[in-house]
Image: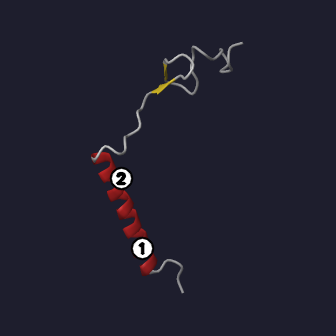
């Protein structure tokens, strides 16, 4: 007996298709929004391009005293 039967494959395909259709409908109707690429620092509000905000963090990446 195999672990991945045709019934299980069909179930996985239908579930994935239903999820994709629901996401597309949510985007089209305005119920979902795509994420913005840019991130803002919660402390100063400037755009953050690296892992930490260069204005709020020290030279080694730790918080300023």
Foreground mark, 1 or 2, reads 2
Residue 59 is situated, as x and y percent measured from the top left of the image, at: 65, 15
Q: Total number of numbered labels?
A: 2
Secondary structure at numbered mark 1: helix
Along the viewing direction, whichever of 56 and 6 lies nearer the viewer: 56
Residue 36 is situated, as x and y percent measured from the top left of the image, at: 40, 33
On screen, residue 37 versus residue 62, left or right, reads left
Secondary structure at numbered mark 2: helix
On screen, residue 14 versus residue 55, left or right, reads left
Q: How is the image coloured?
A: secondary structure
Mark 2 — residue?
A: 23
- Tell me which residue sits at (32%, 58%) in the image: 21
Q: Which mark is residue 54?
A: none
Q: Quadrant of residue 31?
A: top left
Along the viewing direction, whichever of 39 and 54 lies nearer the viewer: 39
Q: Which mark is residue 11?
A: 1
- Tell me which residue sits at (47%, 80%) in the image: 5
Single out the residue that lies furthest toward the bottom.
Answer: 1
Ranked by sequence position, the earlier of labels 1 and 2 is: 1
Depicted 3 relative to depicted 14: above or below: below
Q: Quadrant of the N terminus?
A: bottom right
Check disc 1: other Cα within 10 Å, few if <14, some if 14-19, many if 20+: few
Residue 23 is situated, as x and y percent measured from the top left of the image, at: 36, 53
Residue 32 is situated, as x and y percent measured from the top left of the image, at: 37, 44
- Tell me which residue sits at (46%, 76%) in the image: 8
Q: Mark 1 and mark 2: span between their CA atoms? A: 18 Å
- Tell me which residue sits at (60%, 16%) in the image: 56
């Amino acid at each position: 007996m195999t672990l991945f039967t045709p019934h299980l494959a069909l179930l996985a395909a239908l579930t994935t298709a239903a999820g994709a259709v629901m996401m597309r409908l949510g985007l089209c109707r305005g119920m979902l929004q795509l994420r913005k690429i840019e991130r803002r620092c919660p402390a100063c509000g400037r755009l953050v391009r690296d892992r930490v905000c260069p204005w709020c963090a020290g030279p080694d990446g730790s918080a300023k005293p």
